[in-house]
Image (cartoon, grey):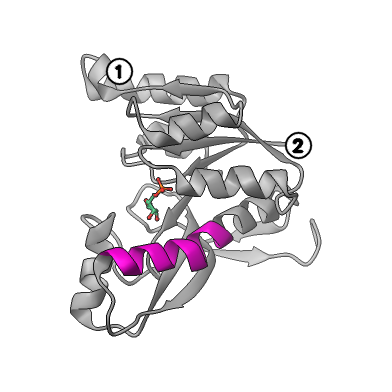
Amino acid sequence: MLNVAVLVSGGGTNLQAIIDAIADHTIQDARICLVLSNNRGVYALERARKAKLPSRVVSPADFPDREKFNEALLAAVKESGADLVVLAGFLCVIPEKMVRAYENRILNIHPSLIPAFCGKGYYGLKVHEAALARGVRISGATVHFVDSGTDTGPIILQKAVEVLPEDTPKSLQLRIMEQAEWKILPQAIDLIAQGRVAVEGRSVRILQQAGA
Ligand code: GRF
């Protein structure tokens, strides 16, 4: 059984997609051992409560400096017994020490087809504003492992979504969530739980069977 810690900062629709996928067995052999938020009072925590999942708040505001917050974040994840850490809209930078401790065991979902519209400054609606400003016909989402860069780690899954002429950043954001993010994030967790994700240098190979 793969223990998954899900880190959130906001509404938690990606968290909900994971909860639902475990419930309907789209994800097998995995369970959520912790929902951790850096913000109090976010709806993601309410989703965790409704699903009877253990949750914790680790907020930078509760620590004298970033270093202490980073230590507490890593300690909380370690204490949960997580094998895999999933960043589901988590807006804090993952400390270098944590990236090293969980090499190729931290997943992020990014709302574009990396390497387009990613890296520093591309988060939330800014990603979709940039895609619309550039006039792309296709955008989408990417699930990747986290390395020490911003959105630079090995790519596991991507899914394309059509951009429509009448799209606003918000409508595009919602369509990408519905058609891509809520599908490929649970799918990637299931592939990892099944032992079907092999990292080879900067790229990932999806195995037909575990270890094959
Ligand atoms: C998603 O758009 C995700 O791609 C980005 O943050 C957003 C999180 O939304 N990293 P939610 O909290 O899962 O609803």
Residue 195: % across, % down: 74, 51
Dominant secondary structure of the residues highlighted in magenta in the image = helix
How far apart are labels 1 and 2 at the CA level?
Answer: 31 Å
Residue type, numbered disc 2: Met
Residue 80: % across, % down: 58, 23
Residue 128: % across, % down: 27, 67
**Mark 1 nearby-residue class (10 Å; few <14, some 14–19, many ≥20):** few
Q: Residue furthest left?
A: 133
Residue 161: % across, % down: 44, 76
Q: Is residue 21 left or right of residue 67?
A: right
The image quarter in which residue 169 lies: bottom left
Q: Is residue 85 left or right of residue 37?
A: right
Q: Nearer the viewer, mark 1 or mark 2?
A: 2
Upstream in sequence: badge 1 or badge 2: 2
Residue at image location 60% in from the left, 53% down from the top: 186
Asked if residue 181 lies in the magenta stretch, the reply is yes
Q: What range of the chain is rendered magenta?
A: 170-184
Residue pointed to by mark 2: 1
**Mark 2 nearby-residue class (10 Å; few <14, some 14–19, many ≥20):** few
Residue pointed to by mark 1: 68
